[in-house]
Structure formats: structure tokens, C-alpha cells
Amino acid sequence: MKLTTLVARVSMCALVAATALAQTPPLVVQDAWIRAAPGSDVAAAYLSLRNSTAKPITITSVYSPVASHSMIHETSVLAGQSRMRPHERLTVPAGQTVKLEPGGLHVMLQGLSRPLTVGEKVPLVLALAGGSTVQLTATVRPLNAE
């Protein structure tokens, strides 16, 4: 085999490998933040989840080392009464974005091990159906932030 052919093949393999590594992850997390609630042992985390695949992605649980219990909740208003209910699983449809935002879906962090401070970076882990995980960091914002 000629040296130029060998170099061309090695270069092509390197390009294919680099492209595969640079591809967008299946679940893209954007704008993750936590609303600080001074004096409380609970907090809410908000973020956007974009599914860049052709198949739905299901989140089965949430974990944070700063909370004894974490889960996805949904706030709704029924007959003028605000209600919150847990979501056992959250599915992000193929090619879609699901926003967790105030007044709707959010991650409830309960039993905080310590008070959270504005500007702090808090780790969260999303467990996905199939066994993979997505690790992210949410920045703590003031109570009145939106």
C-alpha cells in the first residue's frame, strides 16, 4: 500500500472518530438553575431538556448530593388552588424540548443538607431509562429570580 493511501485512510478514520465524539449528546441540558429559599430545607430546580434524537428519552429519577430526596414535580392550579404532584417519569419526545420552569414542571429538592447560597453550583444527576445518566450543574439564583 502506498504511503499516501495509508495516510489518507488514517486521516479519514481520525476524522470519523472526531466527528462521532463531537456529536451532540442525546439529551442536552440548558439553563439549569435553582431558586434559593433562605431558611428552608427545600428548593426547586429548573432547566430545559432538549432531545436531539429520533426516539423519546425518559428520565426515571433525579439525584443531588445536597438533598436527601429529589424528584420531578408539576405545579398546577385547579379551581384557584395551587397543587403539586410528583412525576414518576418524564419523557422528552424525539426532537423536542421540555422546559422545567416556575409554575410548571420542576425538580423538587427536599431535605437539603445545608442552606444553598446564591451563585453556588449544585450538581444534579438525571437517571434515564436504559441505565445511562446525565450529569449537570445548576446555579443557585435569588428567591425572586425567574
Image (cartoon, grey):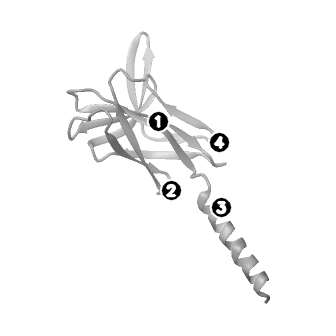
| Amino acid type at image mark 4 | Gly
Would you name the residue on which mark 3 appears?
Answer: 19
Would you name the residue on which mark 1 appears?
Answer: 47
| Amino acid type at image mark 2 | Gly
Would you name the residue on which mark 4 appears?
Answer: 95
Q: Decide: few, some or many residues near mark 2? Use Cα within 10 Å; few <14, some 14-19, many ≥20.
A: few
- Asked if residue 86 lies left or right of residue 91, the reply is left
Q: Position of residue 62 (x, y in %)?
A: 39, 44
Which residue ends up furthest to the top in the rendered image?
80
Q: Position of residue 67 (x, y in %)?
A: 27, 42
Q: Mark 4 or mark 3, which is nearer to you?
A: 3
Would you name the residue on which mark 2 appears?
Answer: 130
Residue 145's tag is none
SS for callout 2: loop
| Amino acid type at image mark 3 | Thr
Using the numbered discs, state the Cα–Cα distance from disc 1 to disc 3 in whole angstroms. Answer: 27 Å
Using the numbered discs, state the Cα–Cα distance from disc 1 to disc 4 in whole angstroms. Answer: 17 Å
Residue 41 location, quadrant: top left
Q: Mark 1 or mark 4, which is nearer to you?
A: 1
Q: Of label 2 and label 3, which has the lower sequence position?
A: 3
Q: Of label 1 and label 3, which has the lower sequence position?
A: 3
The residue drawn where x is 76% and y is 86% is 3
1 and 3 marks in contact (CB < 8 Å) = no
Q: Of label 1 and label 2, which has the lower sequence position?
A: 1
1 and 4 marks in contact (CB < 8 Å) = no
Residue 11 location, quadrant: bottom right
